[in-house]
Amino acid sequence: MFVSGIDDTLIAGKEELSTYSKREINYLLDDGANFTISTMRTPASLYELLSGIRLRLPIIAMDGAVLYDMNKNSFIKAFVISYDTSKEILSLAKEKGLHCFSNVIIDDCLLIYYDELENEAECKVFEKLHSSPYRNYIKLPLPEKTSVVYFMIIDKTEILQAFYNVLKEKGYENILKILWYPSKEYPGYSYIKIYNKNACRENMLMYLKDITGLTTTVTFGSVPGKYDVQVIGEDTNQVARTLRKMYEIPVWKGYLKD
């Protein structure tokens, strides 16, 4: 199974795959190659990006929190944060004057619960994303007994640094996966994303291998030392070229037997 990232791998600084990559990847998929995507993005952000790519395998999305079948529009598996822990995170964020986007899955729909938006960045994020037919924003408190796939908070960097320190002091880093990183789109702002502790791409890849019976993987990504094939620079066709070289039909088609 060939598994590729998206950002800085298949795309770089633009929201589309090259014509060459689309053609080569589809050729290999049509010939039987087992190829899929592993990304921090949500499935909603991938529909337009991967339009025309004839994927058969589910994709690993939300940084390993979910396994999603784009052909059936269905979440196959999700690592979630319990309702009780979710309420604790929401209460703590509110106490610090922060607003959370709570991403939940109900009946194969991604619902995003949120409160009053105040800072410039969170307002712009909402304006940019809420019109998507694959995202459903709901301005209401998190419903009772609802587990959360992940929380997303965006605020000024110094504010989120302080909140990240509070989460660590209270021990949440031991029971949850907490990512804190600067925003590229909104200078001076940062993100915090909070997931189930088991939500990682490696765990979800193991699950995907189990359900498909595929035991060998080749991974593509831009982080040095983390992937089997490192994509260097802005050559977004490297994945497709390398796939073509690595993919081999084990038996000449003219000699295949029933």
Image (cartoon, grey):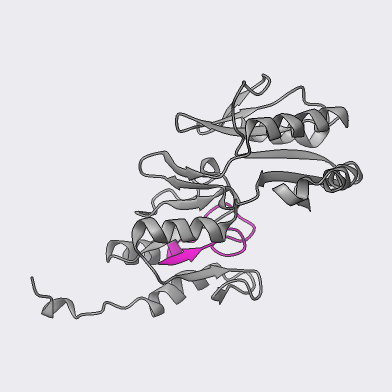
Asked if residue 7 lies left or right of residue 94, the reply is: left
Is residue 150 placed above or below 230 in the rendered structure? Answer: above
The percent coordinates of residue 166 (x first, y second) are 87, 43
Asked if residue 217 lies left or right of residue 28, the reply is: right
- Please name whichever residue, 60 or 203, is drawn nearer the observer in this view of the structure: 203
Considering the image in quadrants, where does the N terminus appear? bottom left
| Picture quadrant where residue 229 is located | bottom right
Asked if residue 233 lies left or right of residue 171, the reply is: left
The percent coordinates of residue 157 (x first, y second) are 87, 46
Can you name the residue that lies furthest to the left here? 258
- Please name whichever residue, 143 or 171, is drawn nearer the observer in this view of the structure: 171
Decide if residue 126 is in sight here: no
The residue sitting at 66% across, 45% down in the picture is 195
Report how many numbered discs are placed on residues in the image: 0
| Picture quadrant where residue 100 is located | top right
Considering the image in quadrants, where does the C terminus appear? bottom left
The percent coordinates of residue 220 (x first, y second) are 53, 69
Is residue 199 placed above or below 222 in the rendered structure? Answer: above
Query: Over which residues does the magenta segment extend?
Result: 1-21
Asked if residue 173 lies left or right of residue 41, the reply is: right
Is residue 57 placed above or below 103 in the rendered structure? Answer: below
Q: Main secondary structure of the magenta part?
A: loop
The residue sitting at 36% across, 44% down in the picture is 71
Can you name the residue that lies furthest to the top here? 140
- Please name whichever residue, 98 or 255, is drawn nearer the observer in this view of the structure: 98
Inspect the magenta stretch and tell me whether residue 8 lies in it. yes
Inspect the magenta stretch and tell me whether residue 14 lies in it. yes
Decide if residue 14 is in sight here: yes
The residue sitting at 69% across, 26% down in the picture is 114
The percent coordinates of residue 159 (x first, y second) are 90, 41
